[in-house]
Image (tube, helix red, strand yellow):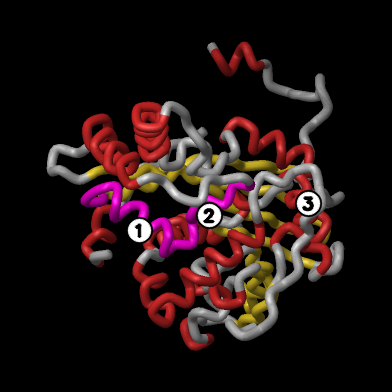
Amino acid sequence: MSLSRLARISPLTRRFASHSASSPPPSFNTVGPYQVFDRNAKRMQKERAALRNGGEQSRLVDYVRDEVADRMMERFLDIKRNFNTIIDLGSGPGHFSKLLEPDKAKKSIMIDSSPATLHRDPADEFEVEIERLGGDEENLLQMIPPDSQEAVVSCLSLHWVNDLPGALVQIKEALQPDGLFLGAMFGGDTLFELRTALQLAEVEREGGISPHISPMTDTRDVSNLLGRAGFTLLTVDIDEVKVGYPSIWELMEDLGHMGERNAVVGRRPLIHRDTLAAAAAIYKELHGNEDGTIPATFQIIYMIGWKPAPSQPKPLDRGTGKVNLKDVLD
């Protein structure tokens, strides 16, 4: 991958809607009603990506996560509160935690299922104290006591969780009253260009389709999921990060180095090369830029929620308003 690819991230596309590598792998819960993703396969994908070329290849494709972490930090700084400790859930090598400054948070506890990813970068790249915990993001309460945390953040990890409602409930339970949850996850329109190109190519060459891009949460459902989990004072908005690639081959190569290969249970182990060649031609025909590159859209859902507490502001009872809405509209 060429570093020049970093320059093709669209800068302002916001629109509102809104252990070491030798350590033993963490255990995984494989029993439950929501087994959409193979969590062990995803851990191994992240491990291989973080270990390739001593981690250098993985660093070259940090551009999407670094961009999203920057935009998450903007939202974090808008919150007029300082924190002693935060949980960085699904932290990877610490894209968000590296941006923390001591006057905003003193310590970050980074949790990730991949030890190699978690320990990829040295501690001197962080300005705050860090603690690294290997563990599955689906089992937060096995690592963190209930009602114990001031804030939990999650930067582009929750889209691989099988039981997203359950994970949000665990995050809420881990927080202290009036504790903060700030998250970012890929939305349902992520990589829609690649999805359509692959589907059309498979229909043409193989007479059917199979999933190659994981299902993702519809943006319209996120507020409902946060509310069902028990969060209050919700804020949800949507961003897009657009990246230009020379062709479908570089896009798929970078996704692999990011640890973002398909991990759907029952996935096909490979795509025929002639199908990929057809997909590459379809991609350029349907979505190609005038300069010959292809765009890849990463839709990002940002969410903020608070654990309920008696001190939080509450809406007034119906009928207690002192200003007539008709007068305001007039």
Task: Tell me the crowding category of disc 3: few under 14, some 14 to 19, or many 20 or more residues within 10 angstroms, Cα based.
Answer: many
Q: Quadrant of the N terminus?
A: bottom left
Q: Is residue 259 visible?
A: yes
- Give left or right: position of 88 versus 317: left
The picture quadrant where one finds residue 272 is top left
Q: Separation of disc 3 and disc 2 at Cα?
A: 17 Å
Q: At 49% from the left edge and 62% from the top edge, which residue is drawn? A: 259
Mark 3, residue position:
307
Amino acid type at mark 2 = Arg
Mark 1, residue position:
253
- Give left or right: position of 76 versus 138: left
Q: Is residue 100 visible?
A: no
User: Considering only vertical position in the picture, is 42 above or below 17?
Assistant: below
Residue 226: x and y in percent read 71, 42
At numbered mark 2, what does the secondary structure look like: helix, strand or loop?
Answer: helix
Q: Earlier in the sequence, mark 2 or mark 1?
A: 2
Q: Separation of disc 3 and disc 1 at Cα?
A: 40 Å
Which of the two residues, 267 or 183, is positioned nearer the viewer here?
A: 267
Q: At 60% from the left edge and 38% from the top edge, which residue is drawn? A: 217
Mark 2, residue position:
75
Amino acid type at mark 1 = Glu
At numbered mark 3, what does the secondary structure look like: helix, strand or loop?
Answer: loop
Which of the two residues, 25 or 318, is positioned nearer the viewer here?
A: 25
Q: Earlier in the sequence, mark 3 or mark 2?
A: 2
Which of the two residues, 149 or 321, is positioned nearer the viewer here?
A: 149
Identify the magenta region.
Answer: 245-265
Between marks 3 and 1 in the image, the one whose residue lies nearer the viewer:
1
